[in-house]
Amino acid sequence: MKGKICVAFSGGLDTSIILKWLIDEGYEVVAFTADVGQEEDFDAIREKALKLGAVKAEVVDLRREFVEELCFPAIACNAIYENVYLLGTSLARPVIARAQIDVAKREGCFAVSHGCTGKGNDQVRFELAFYALQPDIKVIAPWRDPVFYERFAGRNDLLSYAAEKGIPVTSTKAKPWSMDENLAHCSYEAGILEDPNVTPPEDMWKLTQSPLTAPDQPEDFTIHFEKGYPVKLEYTEAGKPKVVTDAVELFLTANAIARRNGVGRIDIVENRFIGIKSRGCYETPGLTCLRAAHVDLEGLVMDREVRALRDQFVTFNYSKILYNGLYFSPEREFLEDSIKSSQKSVNGVVRCRAYKGSFAVLGRYSETEKLYDMSESSMDEIGDFAPTETTGFIGVSAIRLKKYGQMKQAAGEKM
Amino acid sequence: MKGKICVAFSGGLDTSIILKWLIDEGYEVVAFTADVGQEEDFDAIREKALKLGAVKAEVVDLRREFVEELCFPAIACNAIYENVYLLGTSLARPVIARAQIDVAKREGCFAVSHGCTGKGNDQVRFELAFYALQPDIKVIAPWRDPVFYERFAGRNDLLSYAAEKGIPVTSTKAKPWSMDENLAHCSYEAGILEDPNVTPPEDMWKLTQSPLTAPDQPEDFTIHFEKGYPVKLEYTEAGKPKVVTDAVELFLTANAIARRNGVGRIDIVENRFIGIKSRGCYETPGLTCLRAAHVDLEGLVMDREVRALRDQFVTFNYSKILYNGLYFSPEREFLEDSIKSSQKSVNGVVRCRAYKGSFAVLGRYSETEKLYDMSESSMDEIGDFAPTETTGFIGVSAIRLKKYGQMKQAAGEKM
Amino acid sequence: MKGKICVAFSGGLDTSIILKWLIDEGYEVVAFTADVGQEEDFDAIREKALKLGAVKAEVVDLRREFVEELCFPAIACNAIYENVYLLGTSLARPVIARAQIDVAKREGCFAVSHGCTGKGNDQVRFELAFYALQPDIKVIAPWRDPVFYERFAGRNDLLSYAAEKGIPVTSTKAKPWSMDENLAHCSYEAGILEDPNVTPPEDMWKLTQSPLTAPDQPEDFTIHFEKGYPVKLEYTEAGKPKVVTDAVELFLTANAIARRNGVGRIDIVENRFIGIKSRGCYETPGLTCLRAAHVDLEGLVMDREVRALRDQFVTFNYSKILYNGLYFSPEREFLEDSIKSSQKSVNGVVRCRAYKGSFAVLGRYSETEKLYDMSESSMDEIGDFAPTETTGFIGVSAIRLKKYGQMKQAAGEKM
Amino acid sequence: MKGKICVAFSGGLDTSIILKWLIDEGYEVVAFTADVGQEEDFDAIREKALKLGAVKAEVVDLRREFVEELCFPAIACNAIYENVYLLGTSLARPVIARAQIDVAKREGCFAVSHGCTGKGNDQVRFELAFYALQPDIKVIAPWRDPVFYERFAGRNDLLSYAAEKGIPVTSTKAKPWSMDENLAHCSYEAGILEDPNVTPPEDMWKLTQSPLTAPDQPEDFTIHFEKGYPVKLEYTEAGKPKVVTDAVELFLTANAIARRNGVGRIDIVENRFIGIKSRGCYETPGLTCLRAAHVDLEGLVMDREVRALRDQFVTFNYSKILYNGLYFSPEREFLEDSIKSSQKSVNGVVRCRAYKGSFAVLGRYSETEKLYDMSESSMDEIGDFAPTETTGFIGVSAIRLKKYGQMKQAAGEKM
């Protein structure tokens, strides 16, 4: 025996091959499957792992910590990568990696293994997490091991090995793209999507209704936030008002509303951590709505300068750090402290609408926060300050610009 | 005679009163009206000004410079304020202020006057521009002059003065909000909108079809960019392919498509320059599509690091500068040089769709830019680099994190 | 009686005149004097205020809160304005303003008054603090009141008023510059310094020995930091080792060492908040050493990425906020949370040298922090990672650059 | 023959061994030596290379392009890494790498080789440059090749190989640190310096006089800048005024002045690109003075906001990019455009003093730039704007803070 390895096992073709191959190579294998909300038959996966020869097969339900520890902070800082991508895949990686290391430790494994390819972001995200969490762990990445990837150069090699080893294959025909699903999103990339000018076929999208076939009536709902986190969602079902407050349930409800109304699809060309551009299509239904509502509420309750600092530094960097797999790092802890500090006043309620692919805000209010002051902002009331003061404000603000204007005039330059 | 003033004149009630009042105060008045694409009868405005006693009435067509000098750079840097607002009002102010100063100089005016209120952003934007462009200009702001604003404390005072002076008033009943329109957008604020929880009535929106009543069929169109600027728009009209390339025509066409499909409405609480929070509703149809298409194209053709620097520094600051009325400033010139430098490679084509309030990208390509490489990003091809190299990349990237992880472990802290 | 005012009173000519003038104007006056470590006879000041007619005269010792609440956080984030200025004046303003408001409240004053001129930073710093701390306070700024400043147009007007009112004047001849002193620094500006090409005369500098006449032997000392704050200073006096740990005493000791060795003089042209450039000369002896030692220690114990974020984001903005008088603001609270979060690991010891105007680090160590690893950084040991990994690291880091190089080559452009 | 390699050859022990070893391995070797201003006998180096078996030995004088293309832009943006390090080594790498690639191309080499260790920054800097400049080049890094580094595990292995192969060794005893020298600086690291608490011995410093033994009289000199670059240096030699204007000569003169006065030594623990902390001591005499003078001049002539953007965005990132070896990259080109844009007004003269380890500014002026205005900044003149305007400026700036203060008061929280 070469030792015990904890292998990430999804039940699909690739990780089934990997699991079997590692056993053939002389390792003892513990199968690890993360339940981050993807639609799967986890009992069947567990059973399959054991049948393939795993000494143990663990399925760990990570949905709650995924929502509470990752999705909610992402909402609280409006996380977004390259202006468009809501980081659905990246958000799940830290909880998966941490759970896999926990299983590895508990089971006495000297190594962990994953089925990520050698060109993607996920290998980096998983491994940086592994190394931070357990600095002396060994990582086995078959898709970067020439012995493995030269043997399994194409799908046919995988299928024939599966046939030879009696590994059950659910569908003989793979989809012409690869997918990754969790509670927050589903991603599609590779295959026919590699041409960035190919419009994805309608039947690719798994989580959301097409905007074109979504209901003709808009659906309204209300989200309550406390310290930047969603804490209550009010909506209507079969004409009756409903309320959810549990984090996971709330997230699932937001998903359900957005999914049936076709909200949350995007299609981008992004820059991977390793420096390659790649095209990805993503469905992020509930998170799209929760994040947009949060952005809106901040307008009402957050100080302008705190927001500006947060936008320029925290949002940008937290998103980049998540994307690049640096969750378990001192800089993430530092930025997360900043997020908490920035969200003290983000308490209030946003009334929302989903309709045929779009999300809109209908109104917002806060019982506790008072930075917005109707009479102060009113053009019809003089309020607390004298309009004449603005003359001085402008006059002083103009000192520097007048000087510059004089210089330009003296130089005969036009502005 | 106290001297000659160039007065911003929209033809509406406020600026009619101001114009007349200034004449009564003993000034000679030149009326200045900017055509930035708002829907108005400019001949009638000119005539009205002269009838009210202006010695001259000038209407200046600023549409081309507005589109080319302001809207296009804004697209090129994805300008956005507080995550949501596309700066429609702010974008028009610099060209208006510059034209008013030009008229003032040509006509020998010692002062300029405007009808902005004393609590808003526009007074600041106009006046900072005036002072930078003509440092010794005097500014007369009646709404900040106690003599004026105490006399005209309510709308009734304005109406009775109008009646007394024979100033024609088009409608006796004002809308319960104030509006500002130009080629790029229409804004709505104040009045009933001051309660941020009041959903604006459907009949408020002037420029765009409601998403709910927009066509049931999506409308597809294609935008070509060169150095970050839109240069060609292809669309279909009555079943026939059409092409526009002229900047103004292109912008108007983007507007038309977005307007009929209900794209570009937003509703936010924002932070004014003077430190007051205020609620604004905005319609920015064409600009919303052009900006979103531009963001998309950058994913395909722009270097990751240039984009990251541009996102964090240029986009944020250029937007803030525009919002705060600091267009005629050294920092705007500095940032605009950066925008140009960043857009050298932003050449390509984006296929777009508008549908019932939402905008989507269908695909994109570039004939000239080659940073995206299908085979390189492909998960199925080994390509130019060895997967084993990634092991080293991760290993070295993990050095710092392992050290941190060891420290945490030694300290017994969990990550 | 027009009511009671709390007047900032330094005992000098200007504030004596202001105090007397306000009494003449019919106000009841409470004199407020802050002891922030400047060299003054505070008993004499108190007596003088009462003699001039103040109903009460309070001297408040703010030295400890100045050091602990302002100077130490400034050290902890390496605060610096425009690359050079250590913010000595700005740092004292918040504690002074807060104490003055406290006295004003306690004594039932409806207003506060200060003697700042109308073109400087200090008026802004004091008043923004007053308004944040007590939003309904009234501020009386005689140097911005035409009645006052037209009456007292020159120094002679002040002197003749003093003579007339029996106000004792200590020196008949003013220095040809103005000064501001506190525990952390002394500033010099205006007068002959207004020509930025005039080298300040040697006898201007009050706090520090000239580097040219400072001791010929260097002086070594050792600073201990905990969570970014200095907690212990070891030095030698008359050949004997000494240790100070009390915050104020430590700061004063650092001052004494730096003063006798001529450390901490600077001379700059800076940009005031109101947009005017001005020339200032500053002596900041102890703070210069404490800050430099802190910067050095961070190299040893702070994570690279946390430091980079802090440098770019916290240091710059915290310094700007302090300079502009925005201490009592949500953004300062936000940034101070970030400082705390960044300094958890800044624990260690720096050995320092002061010599004829320069400060140098002789060495540093930390008992608790382990990010620095001698064997890891050693070029002579293979250590924990394989050199071959770096090949992969470079290879992957080069993917993006190779692509760019290929594009440049194809375009025939030279790099 | 395995093909032709262009080998970086310093004439020292390591690269002599590498050169010989590569010939033994069957390669044809072209020796490349960069003259970046280090003190060396280049004829002897060339001769040694040929004697060791190189088919060609090229020494390329890169001093001018090093000063003009690297050092001057670094001065123009005040480049600095981690608050302290002036990037002396990093600055030379791009010109060396470019010249080596040029030689490699000209001589038909398929590969380049260098003698950098496997843990440092320089391997990364050279190789990223090689790959960007010539994407299909092969790189041979013996110190990362196990065959090589296992054979030459210690200095004795190198010495015995040298003896065996008849490689002349200049000194039998190596210094207990490693050095890198060029026109801008000399660096010291490794060996006894690896303990960050060891003060470097005085005889380590090669370029600068000790501050303790430097002249007792200060030395004054004057630097003229145009568009941010130094263009003239005036100083005194043997009592006679001297002037230099040629870029290289000017840089060498600044070096000479700083060297004899002990200016430019630093000692830091820094963070290498690969994530290891390491201790370095650096002497950067002339560059320290030129950079400090440039920083000073910017205060006089540069707009506040352009400077703030440049400080936060360009200086930080340009420095990081240089440090990490990303000179040949789109982001460096982007930032260099920004530097140029920011320096249009940086024209003027700085009077400087060097004395026993410290640099000071005595005064500065500009004939052409007028943003500084003596009468405007004067506290004694009313000037162009009314002091009463500042009241409005403060009043409006306080609106946001008053609101915050009210909230805090209502919540019973102290500020």
Image (cartoon, coloured by chain):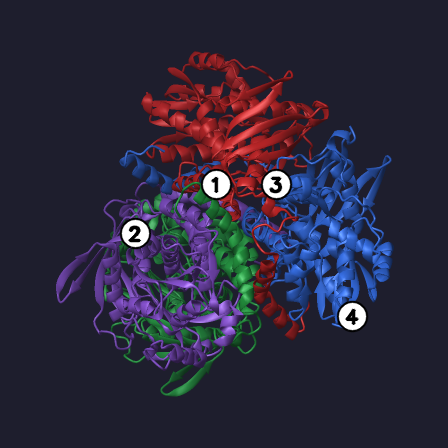
Chain colours: A blue, B red, C green, D purple
- Residue C303's x, y, as percent? 54, 65
What residue would you read off at disc 3?
A: A373
* Secondary-structure class at tag 1: helix
Amino acid type at circle 1 is: Tyr
Determine whether D288 is above or below C230 in the image. Answer: above
| Horizontal side, residue C283 vs residue A339: left or right | left
| Disc 2/disc 3 C-alpha distance (Å) | 51 Å
Name the spot of residue A41 as percent of width and height, x first: 85, 52
> Residue A107: which numbered mark, if any?
4
- C300 vs C189, left or right, is right
Look at label 3 and name its amino acid: Asp
CA–CA distance between discs 4 and 2? 64 Å
Residue C364 horizontal/vertical position (percent):
46, 76
Q: Residue D229 carries which label?
A: 2
Sequence-first disc among 4 and 3: 4
Q: Tag 3, which chain?
A: A
